[in-house]
Image (spheres, coloured by chain):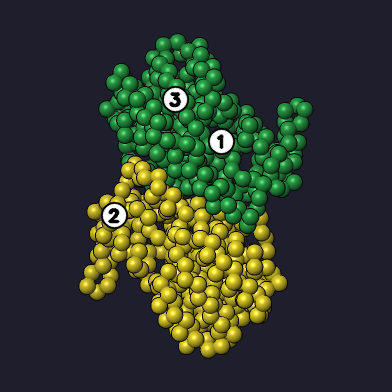
Chain colours: A green, B yellow
Amino acid sequence: MPHRKLEGKKSLFIVTGASRGIGREIVLQCAARAADASAFLITARNEAALVEVKTAIKNKNKNARVWIVVCDMADLNDEAKMSFDTVMREITEQDTYESLFLFHNAGYLGDVSKKALKLNDAENWAEFLNANFVNMILLNNLILKWITNLTCPKRYIINLSSILAIQGFVSFTQHACGKAAREAFFRGLAVEEPSIRVLNYAPGPVLTDMYKIVQEKSYDPTIRKAYTVNENGNSAAKSDVHVAQLTPEQTVTKLVRILNDDQYESGAHVDYFDDEEQSV
Amino acid sequence: MPHRKLEGKKSLFIVTGASRGIGREIVLQCAARAADASAFLITARNEAALVEVKTAIKNKNKNARVWIVVCDMADLNDEAKMSFDTVMREITEQDTYESLFLFHNAGYLGDVSKKALKLNDAENWAEFLNANFVNMILLNNLILKWITNLTCPKRYIINLSSILAIQGFVSFTQHACGKAAREAFFRGLAVEEPSIRVLNYAPGPVLTDMYKIVQEKSYDPTIRKAYTVNENGNSAAKSDVHVAQLTPEQTVTKLVRILNDDQYESGAHVDYFDDEEQSV
């Protein structure tokens, strides 16, 4: 398979929400596939979990450089921004890389306990939009201010999105609004910055902690049932909103393949299931 | 033309941003086409302009009931909500209507002076999202709390959206994010509330005050030029972002036709240009 963009390359990987779930899996697959002496900046709230992820990176990529920034994306305050600035300065001063892969994976589910017609708490909306949308933009722009094409001639931004960005489902309206706004931001960035490749990736219904929150909190009994995990670790029922249940490994394997192939239009929405018929 | 949903019906029309531009035109076309004794709730910041619109309504629909609420959607405070509650109580106590048509037209352009990579002011984002997204939701839900199918057996919500909700253009990223989030909200509402019909309508590039702001403020010279109006009132150049220049009358005529025909899927994005080839 010629011309793969990630496999075997010396890259800088920056991953938010890197301590668990899809974010952790992204880090580990990239560590296994990237060239030796690649670099990783991993961030999340849980420092202990990030330290474990760092160890796991070193096991797969023994000369990797790894930076950790402990940060809550709900509170990207001046101190947090300074931590990122400090790390970004170190990264850019120490080395150059063939590519930057910046994965915006952090985010939370939002309120699934209420219908759209009951989402009337302005403060709740402000917090949700800040954590899941505005602070993602601020961090994105901070990183891209440091990582010009002098440090990384090729730059890839991957927004972990959702089918909800383009399709409505009961009980997921707040989540959908955040994802739709994020995709719109990256569509704009993609047309303004032709030198940057942008992917809005919908990972499918993946069994993560978010999955369990849906099962507990959704106002809709059909959704709760669809997200109930039985004793075999599988969901009890299928619904429109999740036609299958995926593992982080499955969806990240697909994402890495999409990045390696590099065939998407910059700014496009690409779903895990888009070409599953042909690849099965 | 049988079964038209707006023409000749006694309806309740609620229009935000009703003092000028597309909002004013919506009010006037609805006043001319609706049955006698229809009702109008018009809202905007400029009271004098709303009073003029009220007179214009009465000229077209002499027994119309007209309520005015002076309100800045950037500041939907408790007092403003109480004003709406008072008016909504009056409306629901006085009469019933065949249909509610609720037009969410208020909104502002956002920052077109900066690239997406420079949209780094969290406070500016919070203000923009509040005025153009969150407060629209709060008002929408307040109105629908009052207007059940007892007052209006049929309920239509029309979100004045933009092609930017689904496609990126240079210099319009903030605007696009607001429109994308609004559409996602209404897609969720549409699937949760099958008794309500929801339309996300992209009106095309209409010569309004917003148009002139683009011409003054866009960071991109090509966009500025495309939005420059020459001495004949026409734009000086064409671009991808506006393939033609429309008047409020043109786009509202099309919108009313779409509402009369009632063929769209609830929650769908429908553009002025979607069927222009066949209708020309």
Disc 3: which residue: A69
Q: Is residue B280 left or right of residue B214?
A: right
Tag nearer the camera, 1 or 2: 2
Disc 1: which residue: A203
Q: CA distance from mark 3 to mark 2?
A: 36 Å
Tag nearer the camera, 1 or 3: 3
Tag 1 near tag 3, CB within 8 Å: no
Q: Secondary structure at mark 1?
A: loop
Type of amino acid under label 3: Val
Name the residue at 42% across, 53% down. B128
Name the residue at 38% across, 19% down. A10
Tag nearer the camera, 3 or 2: 3
Q: CA distance from mark 1 to mark 3?
A: 25 Å
Type of amino acid under label 2: Ser
- Taking depth in this image into account, of B259 and A180 the one nearest to the observer is A180
Residue B55 at x, y = what percent? 45, 85
When asked about the image quadrant of residue A273, the answer is top right
Name the residue at 66% across, 50% down. A114
